[in-house]
Amino acid sequence: MSYEELGLKVGLEIHRQLDTRHKLFCKCSTSPPAQEGPKLRVVRYLRETQSELGEVDQAAHFESKRMRRIVYEYDPASACLVELDEEPPHPINTEAVRIALTAALMMRAKPVDEIHVMRKIVIDGSNTSGFQRTCMVALGGEIVVDGHPVPIQTITLEEDAARIVRAEAEEVVYDLSRLGIPLIEVSTGPVLYTPSMAAKAAEAIGRILRATRGVKRGLGTVRQDLNISIRGSGLMEVKGVQELELIPRVIEYEARRLKHLLDLVERLRERGVKPEAVEAQPIVDLTEVFRESGSRVIRRKISEGGVVLGLRLPGFAGLLRGEGDVRLGRELSEYAKAWGGVEGIFHSDELPGYGIGEDEVREARRLLGAGEADAFVLVAGREARAREALEAVRMRAAQACTQVPDETRAALPDGTTVYMRPRPGSARMYPETDIPPFRVSREVLEEIERNLPPPLEKVAEELVKRYRLSSQLAWELIDSEMVEEFERVVGLGVAPSVVASVLTEGLKQLRREGYRVENISPNHIYDYFKLVSLGVTAKESALQVLAEIAKDPSLTAEQAVDRLGLRAPPIEEVNAFIEELVSSVPPSERKSATGRLMGELMRKYRGRVDGGLLNKLLMERLRAE
Amino acid sequence: MLVSGVERWEGYSGFLLEMIRAAGAEIGDEVVVERPDGSRFRGLLMFKGELSAENVLVLKLSNGYNIGVAVDPSCRIERVAAGRRPAFTRPPPPPQKSGLPRVKVIGTGGTIASRVDYRTGAVRPAISSEDLVSLVPELSELALIDAEVLFSLYSEDFTVREWEAIAERVKRVIEDGFDGVVLTHGTDTMHYTAAALSFTLQNPPVPIVLVGSQRSSDRPSSDAAFNLMGAVWVAARAPFGEVVVAMHAWHSDEAVAVHRGTRVVKMHTSSRDAFKSVNATPLAILSGGSLKMLDSDYHARGGDGFVYAPGFSDRAALVKFYPGMGPEVLEYLADRGFRGVVIEGTGLGHVARRWIPVIKRLTESGFFVGMASQCRFGRVNMRVYNTGRDLLNAGVVELDDMLAEVALVKLMWALRRTSSLEELARLMLTPVAREVGSRTLPQGVGGV
């Protein structure tokens, strides 16, 4: 079935950290501290509250049901009382607003006249306040992808959340250094109809954001959320797609998954299974059946004081098993894990199995009153949790009879997704009264408009024209976010094509060979080429030197050159060697031996003395005949 | 439901207000704004704060965001649908368990009982004590809660009248046989009220616990729930009968420190652990469901000696000395009918020497001058330096280790009991609620 027939609709939410000096609502730096300081710990609990409209948000309610202990680890070098929720936020960072407005104007969006900061309730602990501060900066823009216009719905500015360190059933640990870093969020409407179109739109938005020169770069600075639906399904908000390449794979997976779940709705309808019948099923204690179970997991749970609870799913026999990586059984299991905090479920389509024997299955069926046409689900664990898990399973199974519900899901590195929580509604937003509205004045907008940075297409054109680079090399520089480094180094007088290929192909090659390229700082690169421009070493040594720095980033470029023995000898020594070489050849044969002599020179001085210089010195000597 | 016109439209004024009225739009209604340039905005009409520009309409978009839309008379505002007014609906309170201690929760206002005020955009007192109990259902596990609102004021608006009203109400609650009393209170002046209650309700038979919060209770991270649970626990089960303040011991939601009402001050503008005992250890720490007493010398729950001594005079003042300050302020106060001051002097208890003749003249006319220190920690001692000795000779009463704010409250209380300077001095230095004359230990020893 084609995506068109499926009625696939995808919307993007691209998040990117801004490279401002300070965080969005305090004076902490947005860069990680040079040295990790001692970590302090604060323990908190969060409770659900009502929004401005007097409603409790579904997603917030889900998190608060869990009432987990939240531990915040923080380094005073990168978090202050504001991140600890011990001091009111400062007024919004105007540097961040400016970058967001720049991006907005580049996407032809309309800035709002007054920016109102909102509190978006998020009580999983990732924000110490229990809400994320966020504000609408602009509405209704447009970008062009592959010649097609793609509408931009909204551009918002928000604070990044704390980084999760680890999550356990009773406790979740966050690090506060990331909390409060400004994030821009660009959302398209649900107007992308194929996986590849979505990926291209994401790339185009990324390029515009980079063109502002106000965004951070590198791992963890970009997060892509996808809003995915097919005709007849609910809306899936898939969070945290890190890599551009993963976007089409996640969409393909979701389309397949949603199609399967919609097919199940049809089959359950054909079988005459009603949601009310599922909702009416009791949760039954089956612990006695499994006391001597062949399953080690179940025996362990019981010996730890746990129980085994079961739930009959009337008319579901054979429907949980699914096709390949999309299975209703997996969906139910994810709900059980998310709501009940259990490790997983067993369902009858995969039993007997996992050590659970024929007799146990028969006895469970008997006690649950489950016939051949019925399926059942088992959960082992502490009673309260197991019960909450099965209640969630029952809720999801009942929904399966009529719909594919809206969900918030997390993207996994393998391109699949997993259920996180219900989709939050607009009920989770209320005004952040600690921060005054920010007036977007016409003067500021006009000033930003006049100084809009060129789009990256323009930048590529310029690179080709000014430095005579190939278009491909120019785009490689742009896509590897090396334009600024490139221009700095070229300013030293080093050949542009050499610099460009080291910064793109060269670094890629090092990464392929397993070097930690992220250890090489822009200053290392600049300093190295400075040595080249001064004749201290030769450009041919670039990859060796950078590899050495990648191994040991505490080295300066000069120390790396010396450690590798790549420092150029004094010119007299080179000339003496040339003299020796040339003298060894009879004068009449010298002209024809030029190539061989050059080869000998390079063998001796490669990476230390520039090839062009050696050639020049040799030619001078030969011309002197 | 109509509130008065002014109330409803606060935030909007001038031509914009007229346009909204002409459109017949109410707060919460769905409206469309069309501007001459063709731009069009659709959303719910929202209240707006005082800091929003006059020509800006605040709309809540369908995604929940509020935005400000600049409007001029050439724009069109159309009401397209009726909306729902922002309102707070209280979840049903939990069923009360029997056999638990009875605790009275009295609301007086403050952040612990506050919500967003859409008129000013700031937080203001709004949630009733009943709301608090229904929002913190765990309270029903700790005690049989009986909640009421006495008033709903920012604590900076309190006067001696509020202290008297609270004391009077608490006295009757004690007579009604409650096992403990919790007062929700704004934090800014909670330590003053704590001192006032300590002098008015001496040796009470049950704990009287003041509690507040530094983060408003409409935020998921509010400290209100944790502090309130701690306060109710103390009121229901603590072994002492004293006036105390129960607040976060540190930044974590792990421990509540219980401070004596006469030994506590607010030491931080915003942090959860703003309240600290000064010149004393906290009386107790509540953590993990158990109360650890840090001072074994306390007035026991059910112990005798309960005295109700109501009444405060507002004819006393607190004066902080600074270098170069002249003594005129004392003369001004005496002229305006004040009957005494507590001076926050420097160091061990000093003011500039040129104050001495003025003080001498005032004390001779029956005006009380007491000396506390602006050092916060430690005891005044005016016999170490000449200035101190001369001030004593001029009639200044050194207030030992009493906190300046507590000394002020005590002076206000004492002025209702005597007008003789000698008797005032005796009263000020006689411990009533462990406010004066204790041993001073290095800060932090035996405490937290």
Image (cartoon, coloured by chain):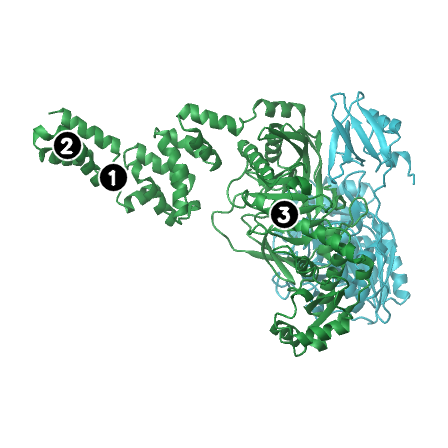
> How far apart are labels 3 and 2 at the CA level?
66 Å
Give the mark nearest the N terminus, 3 or 1. 3
Q: Quadrant of residue A350?
A: bottom right
Q: SS at mark 3?
A: strand
Q: Which mark is residue A172?
A: none
Chain identifier, cyan in the render: B
Q: Nearer the viewer, residue A545 or A462?
A: A462
Counting from the top left corner in percent of width and height, residue A423 is at: 71, 49
Q: SS at mark 1?
A: loop
Counting from the top left corner in percent of width and height, residue A300 is at: 62, 74
Q: Amino acid at mark 1?
A: Arg
Determine the residue positioned at 13% across, 24% down.
Answer: A624
Q: Nearer the viewer, residue A237 or A290?
A: A290
| Labelled pair 3, 1 in contact (Cβ < 8 Å) | no
Q: Amino acid at mark 3?
A: Lys
Q: Quadrant of the C terminus of chain B?
A: bottom right
Q: Nearer the viewer, residue A99 or B167?
A: A99
> How far apart are labels 2 and 1 at the CA level?
19 Å
| Labelled pair 2, 1 in contact (Cβ < 8 Å) | no
Mark 2, Cα crowd under 10 Å, few <14 / some 14-19 / many 20+, is: some
Give the mark nearest the N terminus, 3 or 2. 3
Q: SS at mark 2?
A: helix
Determine which residue is flagged by label 3.
A239
Q: Which mark is residue A593?
A: 2
For chain A, give the colour: green
Q: Amino acid at mark 2?
A: Ala
